[in-house]
Amino acid sequence: MQNFEISVLDLAPVKKDKTIHDTFQDSLSLANHAESLDYKRFWLAEHHNMESIASSATSVLIGFIANGTKKIRVGSGGIMLPNHSSLVIAEQFGTLESLFPGRIDLGLGRAPGTDGLTAQALGRNPAIINQQFPRQILELQKYFSKENSEALVRAIPGEGLDIPLYILGSSTDSAFLAAELGLPYAFAGHFAPEQMEMAFNIYRQNFEASKYCTEPYIIACINGVAAETSEEAHKISTTLFQAFINIIRNDRKPFAPPVDDMDNIWSPMEKSMVLQKLRYTLIGDQAEIEEQLKSFQEKFNVNELMINSHIYDHQKRLDSYTIFRKAKDAVLNG
């Protein structure tokens, strides 16, 4: 088993009976906690028109988190690039990197991060997405290059800055693209685990070294819920289960507190669908998390594990990341 890093994915979850201001303060608190535990990076994800997720203005929120921390890398997991002009994203992340040198990541996805009607409001053209996304990545690389200084259109700030790009995916399409471009690859196993193993194989087999990345680099994003006892972990994980039920039902309401019995909420078919989507979710006490981490890494052998944790109680969410840190260290040192 190779060494692996651990990081945080934060969707800026909005909780029932809490404000969005509370959400942002909790995100900053979590980032500070992750930094104190030497997590590698803290990423925020672009979503729109969702009452349960407040990270729509992703670049703005990255600035808030980076300003409130000192050393942890902060970035996007990701920016949904076809929602934006390449130049604007180059300028935004050039500004962030200029404010917080050596700490900004730019993870890029092609999905809308929302429903079809909202995607239309964002100005996306679904007919050209598969051609547009690779072209925009190349545009970003051009805007960030020193060589672009002679161009008629320049990214100021942004030009000449070393801002690492990561390709995000939830299917095999982006695995081919990341391999072709020689860029690091992050897979959204926290909501789309079905093709994760195949995507990693495609990426590794087709990877072409580049000046950005000399060998494959894989980040697997999964859900994780840890607590002092197994019973407590499974109890607080019901917030995550309810969130996925809401997705199935197209109900975007804020995240709910845990419940004693999910069978009062989901149907047998819904339960099956949720558990299928959460097949790589790690739930348990520290000993159980250690075994699950070991099993996951023996199967996938990733460079980095990015943990998304839907836990209603903020202190318990912090505690969960503490347990994951201890479990990861135990796995590697055991």
Image: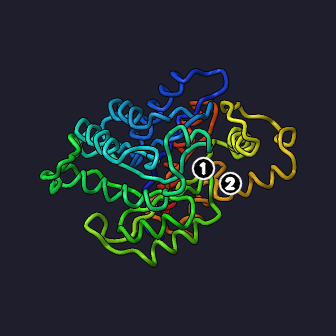
Q: Quadrant of residue 62?
A: top left
Q: Residue at x 32, y 73 (%)?
A: 209
Instruction: Establish if 40 lies above or below 291.
Output: above
Is residue 102 left or right of 310 when viewed as pictured?
left
**Residue type, label 2:** Leu
Say the numbered circle drawn on residue 278: 2
**Residue type, label 1:** Asn
Is residue 95 left or right of 307 when viewed as pictured?
left
Instruction: Establish if 292 lies above or below 52.
Output: below
Q: Residue at x 47, y 58 (%)?
A: 186
**Residue at image mark 1:** 223
Label 1: few (<14), some (14–19) or many (≥20) C-alpha neighbours in 10 Å:
many
Of the image marks 2 and 1, the number of the one nearer the N terminus: 1
The spot of residue 306 in percent (x, y) is 49, 52
Q: Quadrant of residue 148?
A: bottom left
The spot of residue 243 in percent (x, y) is 69, 40
Q: Quadrant of residue 297?
A: bottom right
